[in-house]
Structure formats: C-alpha cells, structure tokens
Image (spheres, rainbow, N blue to C red):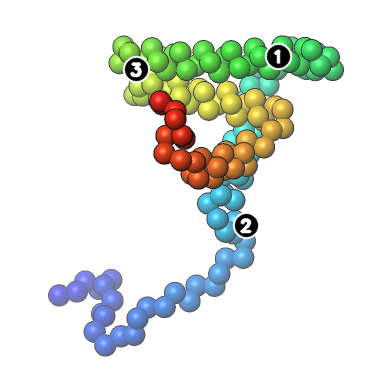
Amino acid sequence: MSTPNTPSVTGTAPVVDETPKDDTMPFETIEERFIDAMGEMAARAHTNSSMHGFWRWYEAHKHDPDSVVIWKLSRHALINSETGECTEGVRKELPDNHLSNRSMEVAELADIVIRVMDYAGGHGLPLAEVILEKMAYNAKRPMMHGDKKA
Ligand SMILES: [Mg+2]
C-alpha cells in the first residue's frame, strides 16, 4: 500500500530529470571547485591572521628582500612546530586544548593547513593549483617513488 506522497511506478515511463541546467554553476570539475574553495579559504586564513596582528612585522619589513627571507623562514619554523605538536598528540593520545571534542592529532594537522593557507594567501602563492599539479605528478611516480624507504 502506498502513502499519498508515494508516486505509483506501475505503467509509468522512467523519470527524466527535465530540470533546466543551472548556468550559474561556475565549475565543472572537482579540481575547479578545489582551486576556488582553497583560494577563498587561504584568503580567509590570511585575513584572520593579519587582523590579529601576525603580519605586522612583515608589513614593516617587506621592502627588504633579506627580511622577507627571514620572515618566511620564521613561518616555516611555525609550521614545523605544528607538526611537533601533532606528534606529541599522537604519542600521548591527547585531546586538543581548544576543541575538547577533537584529538590533538587532527587539531594540529588543521593548524598546519591553516598556517600554510595563511602563508600562501599572504604571499599570493597558487597553493591549490600546485597541490593538484603535485598530486598528478605523484600519481605517476613508481612504487615507493623508486628506492625511498618511507
Ligand atoms: Mg597548534
């Protein structure tokens, strides 16, 4: 027995989706959506970081090439520090300090991604595009990328 909202399928033609195509959808592939979304999220990460004062030193020194290198190295150190925190979280099976429903492991991985997006957003680097290029390159590499142990 069918309910009033259940259409009868007896003797009916297959349902054809005649919904007009949405011409407002700007992306056709997941890669295009990824580039768009990652670009937007990198901009947001950078805006938030800037608004909290973390780019003040860079803004004051960005016209000196040596200072820019020092700045970038300091950002790399901070990204590295997040990997150490992730390692510690796994070693001790800790919850995150700020998101108590999340493990420290995943929260620190998120910190890494946020810091990388901030860096790319702040320096205008095409992070999403290069991620896709690297993934495509890696997909074609040999097993264990040749003689690598890990
Ligand atoms: Mg952290």
Q: Residue at label 2?
A: 26
Residue matched to label 3: 90
Name the residue located 81 percent from the left edge and 16 percent from the top edge.
65
* Percent coordinates x, y for residue 26 in the rendering: 62, 57
Quadrant placement of the C terminus: top left
Residue at the extreme right: 63
Q: Three-letter amino acid code at disc 1?
A: Trp
Tell me if residue 125 comes above or below residue 89 in the rendering: below
Residue 105 in the image: state x and y as whole percent: 38, 21
Kindly indicate whether the residue at mark 2 contacts the one at mark 3 (C-beta within 8 angstroms).
Answer: no
Is residue 96 among what the camera can see? no
Report the amino acid beneath label 3.
Answer: Val
Left or right of residue 22: residue 98: left
Q: Residue at x 35, y 22 (%)?
A: 103
Residue under label 1: 71
* Residue neighbourhood size for the residue with mark 2, other residues' Cα within 10 Å, grouped as few (<14), some (14–19), many (≥20): few
Taking the image as shown, residue 110 lies to the left or right of residue 69, namely left
The picture quadrant where one finds residue 91 is top left
Mark 2 sits near ligand 1, with its Cβ under 8 Å away:
no
Report, in whole angstroms, how far the alpha carbon at label 3 lies from the one at label 1: 29 Å
Of labels 3 and 1, earlier in sequence is 1
Q: Secondary structure at mark 2?
A: loop
Q: Secondary structure at mark 1?
A: helix
Q: Is residue 102 visible?
A: yes
Comparing marks 3 and 2, which lies closer to the viewer? 3
Looking at the image, tell me whether mark 3 or mark 2 is earlier in sequence order.
2
| Residue 43 at x, y percent in the picture | 65, 33
Q: Is residue 46 above or below residue 137?
A: above
